[in-house]
Amino acid sequence: MADSNTPKDKKSKKLSKSAYENKLAELQTELVKLQEWVKLKGLKVVVVFEGRDAAGKGGVIKRITEKLNPRVCRIVALDKPTERERTQWYFQRYVSHLPAAGEIVLFDRSWYNRAGVERVMGFCTDDQYEEFMRTCPEFERMLQRSGIILLKYWFSVSDEEQEKRFSERITTPMKRWKFSPMDLESRSRWVEYSEAKDKMFAFTDTKESPWWVVEADNKKRARLNCISHLLASIPYEAIEYDPIELPEINKEGYVRVPLESQSFVPDVTEDLS
C-alpha cells in the first residue's frame, strides 16, 4: 500500500550512528524489562505491523526481538494461505497464532492482507472484502475483551524513498531475495493501494484499536520512534531479581578427553586485522 501524503521534510535530518546505537540499546534494555513483566503478570500482547513494501517493518521487528527470548516474543509471518485455509473462516489461520499468557506475538503483516494485497490483486471477492471490513473491528474488540493487548502500526514511506529501497534490493546480493514480483505490482498499482489503505483506515482506525502511523523515510528514526511508542503503550515495571552466586566447579576425579580427538571448525579469522 502507498501513501500520497507522507511528509518529506519532517525529521529528515540524518541521525548519527552513535546516537542511534545508544538510544537503541537503551530501548532494548527496556524491552527486556517489558518481556519479564509480561511473563510475570501473564499478559498477552499482539503487535501488528503493516505498511508499504520496503517501508522498514522487518527492520523494526528485528530490533525488537534481537535481545528478547524467542519463547516469549515470537514473530508470525505467514505465507499465502493453503487450499484448505482458503475454505476456513478468514481469521482462523491467525487465531491459531495468538499468544497465551506471558507471550508477545509480532505479526509481520496480518489479517489486514485482505484489505490490502488481496483486495488490490483480486485474490478475494467483493463480498469477502466487504465482510472483512464489517467484521474486522468486531474481531479486534473480541481479542481485546479476551484480555489481549493489541497495537497496530502502519509504516508510511514516500514514493521516492520506496523506489530508492527497491533499487537497492535489486542491486544488492544480500537483499535481492527481499524483492518479489508482488513488489513490482505494488509499484504499478500505486493508486489502487493508496485507495485501499485509506478505506481500511476509515473502517478499522477505531477508538478502541487505533492505527499508529510511523513515518518511515528515515529507518533509524522510525525504529526508535516505534519501539518507544510500544514501550509507552504497555505499563510495566522492572523486576528485581534474586542475587545469584555461581557455584564452584569441582573437577576432581574426571579426566578430559584429548582435544586432538575432536573436530574443530577452521579458524578463518587468523589473517584478519
Image (spheres, rainbow, N blue to C red):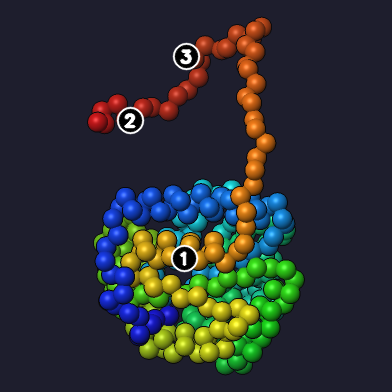
Q: CA distance from mark 2 to mark 3?
A: 19 Å
Q: Residues within 10 Å of mark 2 (few under 14, many from 20)?
A: few
**Helix, strand or loop status at disc 1:** helix
Dot 2 or dot 3: first in sequence order is 3
Query: Which residue is more in the foreground, 167 or 160?
Result: 160
Residue 11 placed where, x, y %?
Answer: 31, 70
* Relative height, residue 269 to residue 168 (above, below): above
Query: Which residue is more in the foreground, 269 or 106?
Result: 106
Q: CA distance from mark 1 to mark 3?
A: 51 Å
**Residue marked by disc 1:** 226
**Identity of the amino acid at label 1?**
Cys
Residue 147 placed where, x, y %?
Answer: 72, 68
**Identity of the amino acid at label 2?**
Val
**Residue marked by disc 3:** 260
**Residue marked by disc 2:** 268
Tell me if I can see residue 142 in this picture. yes
Query: Residue at the spot x=46%, y=51% of the render?
Result: 26
Query: Residue at the spot x=62%, y=86% of the render?
Result: 132
